[in-house]
Image (cartoon, grey):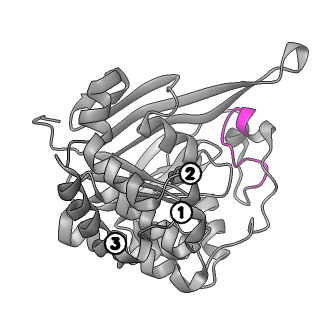
Amino acid sequence: MDSGDSKLLSVEQLTKRFILGGGLSRVRLVAVSKASFQMGLAGPEIFTLAGESGSGKTTLARMILGFIEPTSGSILYKGRDVTRIHGRARRLEFMKDVQGIFQDPFDTFNPLKRIETYLRQTALNYSIAATGKDAERVVSDALAAVGLSLQEIKGRYPHELSGGQAQRTSVARALITHPSLLIADEPVSMVDASLRMSIVNLFRKFKEERGISVLYITHDLATAYYVSDRIAVMLRGTIIEIGSVDKVLREPLHPYTRLLKDSVPEPDPRGKWTEEIALDALEIKEYAQSGCKFAGRCPREIAICRGTEPPEVETDGRIVKCHLYK
């Protein structure tokens, strides 16, 4: 996609509303509310969206990938509004350049097709290879980049791979099109702990050696701290703090970010945030309430928090959405 815009990805005021239930019990849920961030201003980067389960991270990722339509806002990729790209143009221009990696690697593949057949077809369908022989070379190169060989997967169906092999193969599939951006949605949450960091390290390798940017979506603050350049913290559909990973996780400003940090004793890449860190289960009332979504749970709540949406305040090299800093 050709553009003079220096930003790789620009998400502006992105909002998604869902209607739950029917009749008198109908509820309007704002799953993502006015989310804004940019990627690629200073070259390839790993940018993380972090937050507890149900914070809107996956909904935001699915809008960027074009799986669901935004209610409002814009998604600019290399200066072009991707919500206006449809049909063949979307497949060839956008989907070729932006690839997704998902939580369950087995959902990536057709269970009735051998792995190498699926990968070869990916190379041919995106015109990366013109012949079957060319496709095999492309597939072999992609597998080698994730530490696998064509011989290891040849003749095998998805269910015959281990979880780690399947996720590595899923990453290899994403590399076949030579993307500029990977959107990795909880890519290590279903992988054995012994393999988790090896997959996260692949993202760092791709950024440094191939110039690929990664939008890393996770609830695992340890791997986020280890691999990210910048991070945005989400709460009930709202980005409440955004900045360099060192500033946000070492010296958080928003009370919610502080709570997340305090739930992990030290940023240790070998550890994992596996619980809901003593937070309440997802509640529709928090999504629906006016003002700050953290009001009611925040130890520093003030009167204005309950009824007035916090402003975005730029301070100390980051943006924080909190009444305490206006």
Q: Secondary structure at mark 2?
A: loop
Amino acid on which disc 1 is placed: Tyr
**At label 3, which amino acid type do we have?**
Leu
Percent across and percent down for residue 54 are: 68, 49
Residue 7 percent location from the top left of the image? 21, 44
CB atoms at circles 2 and 1 under 8 Å apart? yes
Q: CA distance from mark 2 to mark 3?
A: 19 Å
Distance CA(mark 1)–CA(mark 3):
13 Å
Name the residue beneath numbered marker 3. Answer: 150
226 vs 233, nearest the viewer: 226
Which residue, given by chain and number where applicable, does mark 2 sit on? 112
What's the residue at 31%, 29% (across, down)? 90
> In the image, which residues are magenta?
287-297
Question: Does any portion of residue 249 appear in the rendered image?
Answer: no
Q: Which mark is residue 157?
A: 1
Q: Is 252 included in the stretch rendered in magenta?
A: no
Give the x, y percent position of residue 36.
41, 40
Image location of residue 204, percent across then percent down: 32, 72
Which of marks 1 and 2 precedes in the sequence? 2
